[in-house]
Image (cartoon, rainbow, N blue to C red):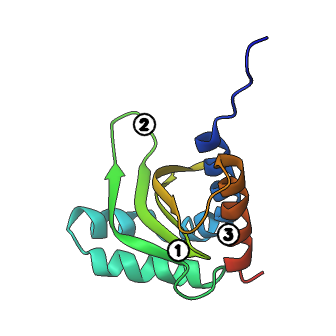
Amino acid sequence: MLPFRIDHSEVREKILGDHIRCVAADLRLIDLPDLVSYLKTGQIASVGTLVQASIELSFKPDTLKFGHSGDVYLEWGALPRVSFDMEFHHQSVHVYFRLMLEAEEAGVEITYISFEGESFGPAHNTTRLHRALGEARLN
């Protein structure tokens, strides 16, 4: 019998995406031309202010942050896509990820994750991530 392997990265990205869905929805309320202009002209502080305002509606202070970087993808014949580098820090769980917004969809890509303290394996760490995200939410 072949051993069954769980892809913890995919599971963790789904958990993260589910918890920050409300932030993505709120960011879509920002006028797209403004975001494009700010990102293309390097006005990162302005982008950060907008992103932080969206975060503050759903997460406790200093748990989810804008990572001071983002990008816009504009191509002829394709819908625009905006990405933001983000950080999550709570209960000794640290996640660096990219939040990607399109017209009808949003997604996350974890670029780095760490868990401080004793670990009992990947499944336990995935549970820790889920618990930390839940605790960091305001509602």
Instruction: Report whether 66 appears left or right of 25.
Output: left
Query: In the depicted view, which residue is nearer to us: 96 or 74?
Result: 96
Q: Amino acid at mark 2?
A: Ala
Sequence-wise, the earlier of marks 1 and 2 is 2
| Picture quadrant of residue 90 | bottom right
* Residue sitting at the far left: 41
* Residue sitting at the far top: 1
Residue at 63% across, 86% down: 60
Does the rendering let one see residue 81? yes
- Check disc 3 and report the residue beneath it: 133
User: What SS does tag 2 mark?
Assistant: loop
Label 2: how many Cα within 10 Å (few below 14, some 14–19, many 20+): few
Instruction: Report whether 106 appears left or right of 130.
Output: left
Residue 89 tag number: 1
Q: Are marks 3 and 1 in contact (CB under 8 Å)?
A: no
- Disc 3/disc 1 C-alpha distance (Å): 9 Å
Query: In the depicted view, which residue is nearer to us: 50 or 66?
Result: 66
- Disc 2/disc 3 C-alpha distance (Å): 33 Å
Sequence-wise, the earlier of marks 3 and 1 is 1
Q: Amino acid at mark 3?
A: Leu
Q: Is residue 63 above or below residue 116?
A: below
Sequence-wise, the earlier of marks 2 and 3 is 2
Task: Please provide percent x and percent y for residue 17.
Answer: 64, 55
- Disc 1/disc 2 C-alpha distance (Å): 34 Å
- Check disc 2 and report the residue beneath it: 78
Instruction: Report whether 101 appears left or right of 22.
Output: left
| Front position among marks 2 and 3 | 3
Task: Please provide percent x and percent y for residue 21.
Answer: 66, 62
